[in-house]
Amino acid sequence: MLKTIATASAATEEGTPPGMGDALSIARLSEARIMMVDDDALMTDTVQAYLEEAGYARFICTNDPRTALETARRESPDLLLLDLVMPHMSGFEVLQSIRAEPDLKYLPVIVLTAAAEPEYKLKALELGASEFLAKPVDSSELVLRVRNSLAFKIYQDYLAYSDTVTGLPNRKIFMRGLEATINRASFEPTTFALLHVDLDRFKQINDTLGHFAGDELLRATAERLNTSLRGGDLMSRVKNPDGEVLARTGGDEFTILLPKLASTHNADQVARRLMKTIAAPFDIGEREIFLTASVGISVFPGDGANAETLLNNAESAMYQAKENGRNRVEFYRDELNSVTLERLDLESQLHRALERNELRLYYQPKVNVASGAITATEALLRWQHPRLGLVSPGQFIGIAEESGLIVPIGDWVIEEACRQGSRWAQEGLAGFTIAVNVSSYQVSGDRLLGIVRHALETACYHNASLVLELTESMLMRNPEQSLRLLGALKEIGPQLSIDDFGTGYSSLSYLKRFPLDELKIDRSFVSGIPEDETDVSIVRAILALAESLGLKTVAEGVETQAQLDALRALGCDTYQGYFCSVPLPPDEFAKLVRDARSAASTS
């Protein structure tokens, strides 16, 4: 550590611009605020002259020790030079009061005194003095002691106020800088903005590629943002924010202070520039990764008079940007508070939904196009909220994904579907498969394999009666990894289906290698048939592709007789949708199947 400090100090003295990752590049030593307390004005003038010659330029002097504590509170110095023997109040008393202040507790203090007796020195060190120099002071030694004390102070500030992954200021120091900006605004009325940047789907990338790659991606993002904000000494800008200030304030969240804003349009321009910067591909290891970001903006003074309110409102606007589709900018509006509070409340309750047994599976039948028999069903998640009633997935799946709850919820869906299938089989209601949707968050590592194996074995459910539906885009994100996963799943026994087929981009060379059983035609193509010739052509092409690969086909979202007739003419195997039935609770679905079979047997 000493070598690092010496190197950083030397680099600073030579005028080398500090790098963002260097522990001591937070502020130039010459910019340090040095406070002197001595009743002898000649002494403070002499010491200041020595230090000015060494390159220091920022001094706070008081010749009345009674004002020392209040001055230190107000000015927040980086170093204190303190005499011991003074009228009205001794240096010992000043030191004791300084050490009792939480914000000044670790301020380095160099004692400069003519009282050099051992007992004075010992008492000063016991009270927390960092260094002890006897008067008359040797100028060379003074400069060296000041430099070393400041270097350690800067290093301590780095540890306390910097994010360990990116090297950016952390939330704590950012909030201090924001509060200082607000305080200055009371004397110099001004408008400024906060930009709260959240990386879209970062958790998915982090879980898939691992935390090492995730940290590397965060560092690369921080460097891009800092460059886009035209760089500079980050911690100095926090203390004296005349330019933009960037900090990492959460896991994948960055916050930017834009001081002295000419107009809100400027904040929008900066936000869009940052989003464009993030959208360029990242090279992480041997992978090319694409990111987008959602940005929320709050503006002082209209959107909040204090730091916490401003940041909370910028976060609210960011959540609204995500709700509106991600990769966009939203300004804070008053009504967003209630929306954000509702969202936070829903997330909090969702954490308890599993343990309170509030989640439910509803079942939508899949019907053979030719015979009209129910041959399969899809398990669809619902939340039986104690106050809100039955909550659809559209209201909580996004929250579950962003909070990480989608993984345990997805595990429960697989296990419950197998349990329900086993119960139906014991009741004599067998002969159809149960499909469940697999989230992209569940496919990292071998977790999915373990959950599927455990669910089938525990429920004693026939392996081939379970169908796992994976989206086309999920499989094509990493085709080789998907190929290994599908092969391992196939060994366990469930059937495999590509959901929403046609909405992504599949390589036919991989598609023919995937051990699939079924293609599901996305509802966006089904809704247009038979009127839309383009949709008819697309469905016909998908059916022909499936036939050539030996795959069964399911058309989803069928709502009319005309759509069903068109699918029958085109040769589709199975359909599902409201034309047959809405998703039903288990008992109602079982009754539907029994009634259909009874009607078929008597006809």
Image (spheres, rainbow, N blue to C red):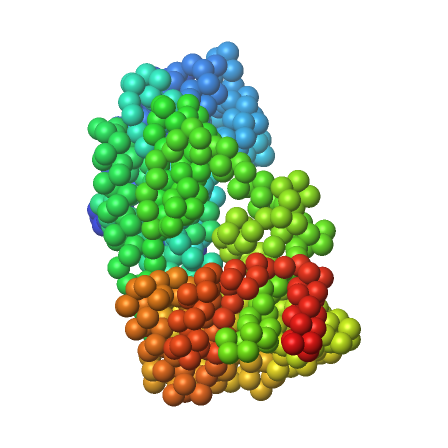
Residue 305 quadrant: top left
Which quadrant of the rendered structure holds the C terminus? Answer: bottom right
Q: Residue, x 60% and y 73% (percent of image)? A: 374
Relative side of 110 to 594, left or right: left
In-front residue for pair 329/361? 361
Of all residues shown, which one is farthest toward the right?
A: 427
Residue placed most toward the observer, 323 or 31: 323
Residue at the farthest front position: 603
Q: Position of residue 363 (x, y in %)?
A: 61, 63
Name which quarter of the figure residue 145 lies in.
top left
247 over 68 or under it: above or below = below
**281 left or right of 126?**
left
- Residue at 55%, 41% (x, y): give it: 344
Where residue 120 sits in the image (x, y, percent)?
Answer: 54, 29
- Above or below, comparing residue 491 to residue 595 in the picture: below
Q: Residue at x 63, y 68 (%)?
A: 414
Residue 103 seen in this snapshot: yes
Location of the N terminus by quadrant is bottom left
Q: Residue at x 66, y 59 (%)?
A: 585
Q: Is residue 47 visible?
A: no
Residue 106 as seen in the image, left or right of residue 235: right
